[in-house]
Image (cartoon, rainbow, N blue to C red):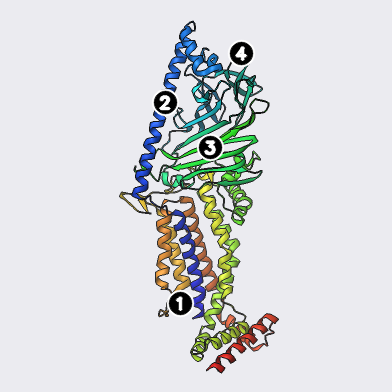
Amino acid sequence: MEEKKFDLNTVIGFVLIFGIFAWMFYVNKPTPEEIEAEKAKQEQVKAEQKTEENKTTEFIKESEAIVANPQDSLALVAAKSQLGAFAYAASLPSAKENVTKIENEVLSLKINNRGGYIEEALLKNFKTYDSVPLYLIKDGKNASFNLNFGTTDNRILNTKDLFFEPSVTKNGDNTVLSMKLKVSESKYLEYRYELKPNDYMLDFTIKSQGLQQVFNSSQTVNLDWKLQAIRQAKSASYENRYTDIHYEYEGDKDDFTGQGDFDEDQEEQVSWVGFKQHFFTSILLTDTPFKTATLASKNIANTSELDDKDIKVTKEFAASMPLELQGGELNYTMNWYYGPTDYKILSSYDRNLDEIVPLGWGIFGVINRYIFIPFFSFLSGFLPYGIAIIVMTIVVRIVLSPVTYKSYVSQAKMKILRPEITEINEKYKDNAMKKQQETMALYSKAGASPMSGCLPALMQIPVFYALFNFFPSAFDLRQKSFLWADDLSSYDTIAKLPFEIPFYGDHISLFPILASVAIFIYMMMTTGQTMQQQQPGMPNMKFIMYLSPLMMLIFFNNYASGLSLYYFISNLITIGIMLVIKNVIIDEDKIHAKIQENKKKPKKQGKFQTKMKQLMEQAEQQQKAKK
C-alpha cells in the first residue's frame, strides 16, 4: 500500500514534467476576430509602406536627375527645398543605388549608398537546411536601419532615404568602410564600419562633424532598427520557438521577449539588443547605453496561413532607441555582430552575450555552463557527435547511479514493510489518527521512509531540465548526422505523412519512438509490482503508465533528435542499472533481516518527533472525549 505512494510520486513526477512541456509547447490560436483585426492592421501597414516607398522612389529619381545634370538649377532648388542642407549629398556622384562590399574569412557584407546600412549579411561557413547560402540580411528586403532627426530649418529627415558617400581603407589587417552623408566636404554624418579578420563582430561608429547648426537640438534623434528573421531550419515552427529579442539593460541585467507577439515595451539604459534566431543572431551593441529602447516582435510563422514548408520568415523584430546629442553632435561607438548563436563564440567577447543562448535559469544554467558544455566539447573533440552524446549519457547515468541505488533500496524496504502496513491499515481502519501514528512508528523503527524514495528522483530533475535546455541550444549539433538522423539539432524522419496531425506533425521520428518504448519499460519495472486492485481515490496507475510515454512520443516528434537520443540511451542505461541492482546488488532477505533488527532496537526520538507524538496523542484523546 505504502510502496504505491512512492511509485505514485515517481510517476506523478514524470507526468508533471511532461505537463510542463505540454504547456511550453502549446500555442494559443488567435480567434477569428483577432485574425480579422490582424489582417486589417497588416493592410494598413502595407498601405503606409507603399506610400513611403513612393516618396523614396520620387526622391531617388530627383537625386539621379541632379547627378545626371548638375547644372540643372531647378533640380538643385527642388532638392534644397526638400532636403535643406543635405541637398549637397544629392548632388554628388554617390547619390545613386550602389553597394560596397567588405568581407573577411567568415563574413561578407554589402552596404548600400542609400541609407549607408548593411543590405546583405552572408555567413560564409554555413548553409541553410536546404543547402543554400545562409543570409541574415538579403537584398536589403528584410532589414532596415534608420536615423530620424529634425533640422534647424524645420525638416524631418530619414537617413534611409539619403545617399552616403563610401570610402574603403585599411587599418592594418582590418578593412574600414566610411559612409558619409555630407552637408559639405568638411561637414557630414558618418557611419564607420571596421571589419577584423576571422571575426563575426565589427566595429561601428555613428559620428557627426560640423552639424551643430543642422541638427535641431530640441528634437530627438531616433535610431530605428528592424529585421525580419529569415527561416534557416528544417522546421519553421521549431526554429520559431527559439527566435526572440534578447537585450541587456541597467548594467548587467538581461532579459528576452519570449516566443509570442511582443507589443512595444520600453527598457532603460540598454547596452545591447539582439535579434536572436535559433542558431544565428544579429546584435547591436553600444559603449554608451541607450537611455531607453522600445522593443517589439511579431510572430509570423504561427499566424501565417501557409504550411510550414512555405514559411520564409519566422518573426519580425523592431527596436527604437533615442540618441543624445553632445555639444550638438552625435558620437556613438558601437558594434555589430552577425554570426552563430554559439555559446563559445558569444562568451569570448566578454559582453554578457552568452546570455542569449537559452541554457536555463539558475542552477540549470550553471550545470550547463560549467559541466555539460565543457564536457561535451571535450568528447566531441575526438568522437563523432552521436557517439559523444551516447558517451556523455553513460557518464551522467553512472554519476547518478548512487541516486538510483538509494531510490531502489527505499522501494525494496517499502515492499518488505507492505504486509505490516496492510495489517496496521486493517487494525485501525476506523481511526485515521492512530493509523498514521502507528505507521510513522513502524517507519521510524525500521529505518525506512516513503520520502527517501521520492527525494532521489527529485534530485535528478535539475540534470533532466539542464539537458532539456542543452541539446536544443548546442550549436555544434547543427547539421551533424548520426545513423538515420541527418541533423541532430532537428527532428529525424523515417516516414513522411500525407497529412498533418495536431501537435505531432507531418512526419514520423524514430528516436522519440525508441525513447517512449524505453520509458514504458522503465515504468513497467517501477509500477508493475503495485498494479493491484484500484484503490478508491487513487489515480489510475495504468492510465498514467501509458500516458507518460505517449506524451514523450507526441511532443518530442518535432524536437531535436539529439535530445531524444539522449533520453533513449539514458532510459536504457537506467533499466540496466535497475536490473543489476535488483538481481545482483540488492538482497531482499538481508534488508528484511536488517529491518527486523532495527525494529528491536530502542529508537531514540528527537525533540520534534517527541512533540509530534504528544500532539497526536492529545488529538486522539480529544477525539475519544467527543465521542
**In percent of the image, x 67 and y 80: which residue is there?**
608
- Mark 4 or mark 2: whose residue is earlier in sequence: 2
Instruction: In the rendered structure, find residue 185 and report the number of the disc placed on it.
Output: 4
The residue to which callout 3 is attached is 319
Residue 10 percent across, percent down from the top left = 51, 69
Determine the CA span between mark 1 and mark 3: 58 Å
Q: Which residue is mark 2?
A: 53
Mark positioned earlier in the residue sequence (3 or 2): 2
Is residue 167 at all visible to an observer of this figure?
A: yes
Is disc 1 placed on a helix, strand or loop? helix
Whether tag 4 and tag 2 are in contact, CB under 8 A, the answer is no
User: Which residue was labeled with disc 1?
Assistant: 530
| Residue type beneath disc 2 | Glu
- Give the residue drawn at x 59%, y 77%: 449
User: Mark 1 and mark 2: span between their CA atoms?
Assistant: 71 Å
Residue 284 is marked as none
